[in-house]
Image (tube, helix red, strand yellow):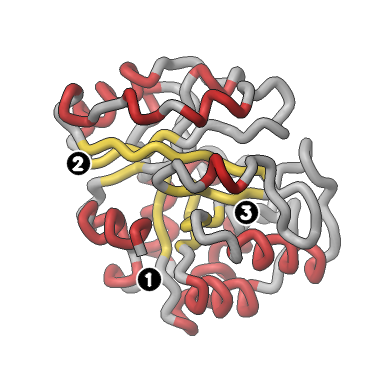
Amino acid sequence: MKDLLDVHTHTIASIHAYSTLREMVTAAKAKGLSLIGISDHGPAMPGAIHKMYFANFKVIRPEDFGIDIVMGIELNVIDYSGSTDLPEWQLRKLDYAIASLHDVCIPPGSAEKNTAALIGAMDHPKVKILGHPDNPLFPVDFDALAKAARERHVLLELNNSSHIPESTRGTAESARALLTACKKYGTMVIVNSDAHIDNDVGHHEAAIARLAESDFPEELVINSSPAAFREWIRS
């Protein structure tokens, strides 16, 4: 499988990450990627940057870096109806958004509540990816999630950092269930690093191994085509 993009990455703007935007982009070029996305945490994350950080991305010009760059956000889902933590007027200015459940922003609920939260978050047109939906801390109905993601034109993420090493007991089993549901409904997935330091940009080996062990169809993984990803977030 060609692997040419990584769009879940964090810079020092996420406070608990340790590399600058330039360092992350330089690492992506060195890795041989064609596209990198910067998706720093939304303001509900403890210690996160002020929301005005997301208001001035027009000054970042990909032609100055020699690699395609998209600028987004990892939104925090903050209630079980799917509300997130950046005003809609600001979200409209971004290239894309990832929506994720984090236990420091919302307590894990039942599978029914967690599923409703993620499906609700998908309803915002800028949300193009669900971040680490296989996190076993937040059990979900994978059939309902995969079906809703296909209907709403949202990518489900296989997050490499969740698998090296397995950060939470049950992650492998949860990922297999997620991929089984995606195969069943023909739901597109994306592999991302969730890098919080430049050394981790583009490192997707563990997630790609999960795809292989599940015999997951390559045509349902968007990483081989930056152009397809660009079109996906425009749609």
Cα distance between the residues tagged 2 and 1: 23 Å
Cα distance between the residues tagged 3 and 1: 17 Å
Say which residue label 2 marks. Answer: 34
Which of the pair 55/129 is nearer the observer? 55
Q: Find residue 110 and report its image quarter.
A: bottom right
For residue 180, above or below residue 94: below
N-terminal of the pair, mark 2 or mark 1, is 2
Mark 2–mark 3 CB contact (< 8 Å) = no
Q: Is residue 45 left or right of residue 235?
A: right
Q: Is residue 171 left or right of residue 98?
A: right
Q: Position of residue 138 (x, y in %)?
A: 74, 56
Q: Is residue 102 left or right of residue 94?
A: right
Disc 2 vs disc 3: which is toward the camera? Answer: 2
N-terminal of the pair, mark 3 or mark 1, is 3
Q: Inspect the image, locate mark 2, and give the three-letter code of the amino acid beneath it.
A: Ser
Residue drawn at point x = 19 percent, y = 24 percent? 65
Say which residue label 3 marks. Answer: 171
